[in-house]
Image (spheres, helix red, strand yellow):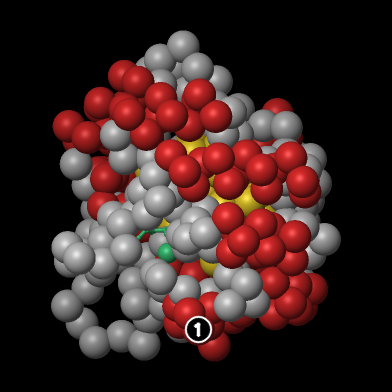
Amino acid sequence: MSVQLDVTGLDSWGFNNDGPLIIAGPCSAESREQLLETARGIKDKGVHILRAGIWKPRTRPGCFEGMGEEGLKWLVEAKEETGLPISCETATPEHVELCLKYGVDMIWVGARTTVNPFAVQALADSLKGTDIPVLVKNPINPDVELWLGALERINKAGVTKLGAIHRGFSSARPSEYRNAPNWRIFIELRRRTDGMPIICDPSHLCGKRELIPAVAQKSLDLLFDGLMIESHINPDVALSDSKQQFTPEDLGKVLDALEVKYSVA
Ligand code: PEP
Ligand code: MN
């Protein structure tokens, strides 16, 4: 059964991409220098939007949990300097409120939030009356209904610049991937949400940089509308997700090597 969503195509989101939308930047904003240097490094590499996690949903307490509002100020500075629109993950209405206050250009809902209808509904309510673009990552478990439900909740709140991100699914099966891809679920989502942009996040899907180029290419071959890829000025010392981040230079090489056979209308 298809789902009735009132969404607009990527061409009306204002990010000036005629091919796949490329979102890149560090897993987390760690310091002003780290974020600004990464932004400077990626700005001429074909990236359309700068990403950086500001509030980090860590599995265990005691890990780096993000810089909060301070990090948003650095994102704004990075935008002023590079001209790149900025984006981050939001998990609560307070996060949304701060993103709106600082003029964040796009937000996404993380995989650990998409699983929770109460959290998604609270986010949706806080988005009423705004027109900020919102991307919804798949839930950590391979449940397409839960993913669709989150998209519907946010769409019913009036968000029409709405899309999804496939970042892979947790599984008890051994896998070379951190979060195994499920292309069937992608195809089902595509079929049931005709016209809604769907982005691939090969970084969280693979968990290791060596695996990322092939998955990125495969997603473009399957006609995903864009990519979200993590990049850090010095990945080896990153405070989160160090094994899956590319230096800006390597990100440029990965993006240059991708074959894109279509433009996004
Ligand atoms: C992230 O984008 O850094 C992140 C935490 O992603 P996910 O929600 O896919 O785990
Ligand atoms: Mn990450």
Report the quarter where the N terminus lies.
Answer: top left
Coordinates of residue 33 in the picture (x, y in percent): 62, 61
Coordinates of residue 141 in the picture (x, y in percent): 23, 59
Please report the residue visible at 37 percent of the width from the left and 54 percent of the height from the top. 66
Figure quarter occupied by ligand 2: bottom left
Please report the residue visible at 50 percent of the width from the left and 83 percent of the height from the top. 236
User: Quick check: can you spot residue 156?
Assistant: no
Left or right relative to 246: residue 265: right
Please report the residue visible at 59 percent of the width from the left and 64 percent of the height from the top. 34
In-front residue for pair 59/22? 59
Coordinates of residue 192 in the picture (x, y in percent): 42, 40
Please report the residue visible at 36 percent of the width from the left and 87 percent of the height from the top. 176
Q: Quadrant of residue 68?
A: top left
Residue 156 vertical position relative to residue 134 in the rendered view, above or below: above
Residue 152 vertical position relative to residue 61 in the rendered view, above or below: above
Residue farthest to the top, as pictured: 129
Q: Secondary structure at mark 1?
A: helix
Sort mark 1 into few (<14), some (14-19) or many (20+) by Cα contacts within 10 Å.
Answer: some
The amino acid type, in three-letter code, at marker 1 is Asp
Residue 10 vertical position relative to residue 206 in the rendered view, above or below: above
Left or right relative to 123: residue 159: right
In-front residue for pair 67/224? 67
In-front residue for pair 52/229? 52
User: Quick check: can you spot residue 146?
Assistant: yes
Q: Is mark 1 within 8 Å of ligand 2?
A: no
Q: How many marks?
A: 1
Coordinates of residue 67 in the picture (x, y in percent): 40, 51
Report the quarter where the C terminus lies.
Answer: top right
Question: What residue is disc 1 on?
Answer: 236
